[in-house]
Amino acid sequence: MAKVLIVEARFYDHLNDLLLDGARAAIEAAGHEHETVTVPGALEVPGAIAIADAAETYDAFVALGVIIRGETYHFEIVSNESARGIMNLSLEGVPVGNGILTVENEAQALTRAKRDEKDKGGEAARAALAMMGLRERFSV
């Protein structure tokens, strides 16, 4: 049984609750345990995962959050840099699934977050578990 850490950037409570529901359901369906920690924003998610990975307590990580485009360039910075940070972790061999939504509006976020629609929280959890399996397969 693996232990998975879900790291969420909680800004839109109702949307995060949907993402968490999907991620937790996917992890439990696979027979694994999970814990959840909350960080201030999407930019902090990769850092929190890096800190937790260094502790060697968790087998995989799920990054969750919602970034909705606003009127400024801030959307691009947060979207791009949080994705870059998660990709850097992946390239270092950290099994992480990226479930940070980057959307134009709340309607798009709802569609992607709901389990009975796109279930991006569940998808991110399944991706993390798949990467965990690859790391185990290729470990020496």
Image (cartoon, rainbow, N blue to C red):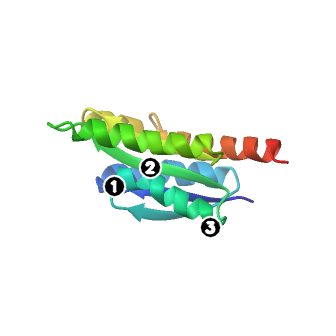
Closer mark to the observer between disc 3 and disc 2: 3
User: Does any portion of residue 69 appear in the rendered image?
Assistant: yes
In percent of width and height, residue 131 lies at 67, 42
Label 1 vs label 2: CA separation?
10 Å
Q: Which amino acid does label 3 sit on?
A: Ala
Mark 1 crowdedness (10 Å alpha carbons): few <14, some 14-19, many ≥20: some
Res 64 label: 2
Label annotation for residue 55: 3
**Residue sitting at 32 percent across and 43 percent down?**
78
Element class at badge 1: loop
Q: How crowded is mark 2: few (under 14 residues within 10 Å), some or many (20 or more)?
A: many
Residue 41: image tag: 1
Say whether residue 25 is left or right of residue 115.
Answer: right
Between discs 3 and 1, the one toward the N terminus: 1
Q: Distance between the residues labelled 3 and 1?
A: 22 Å
Q: Residue 1's spot in the image, x, y percent?
A: 75, 60
Instruction: Identify which amino acid the numbered label 1 is placed on.
Output: Gly
Pick whichever, 117 or 39, lies toward us.
Answer: 39
Which of the two discs, 3 and 1, sits closer to the camera? 3
Instruction: Give amino acid for label 2.
Output: Leu
Q: Residue at x 20, y 36 (%)?
A: 73
* Relative horizontal placement of residue 51, taking residue 42 as reference (left or right): right
Give residue 24's quadrant in the image. Answer: bottom right
For this view, does 6 lie left or right of residue 76?
right
Can residue 114 be spotted in the picture?
Answer: no
| Mark 3 → mark 2, Cα distance in angstroms | 20 Å
Name the image quarter holding residue 97.
Answer: top right
x%, y% of residue 14? Answer: 31, 53
SS assignment at label 3: loop
Element carrying mark 2: strand
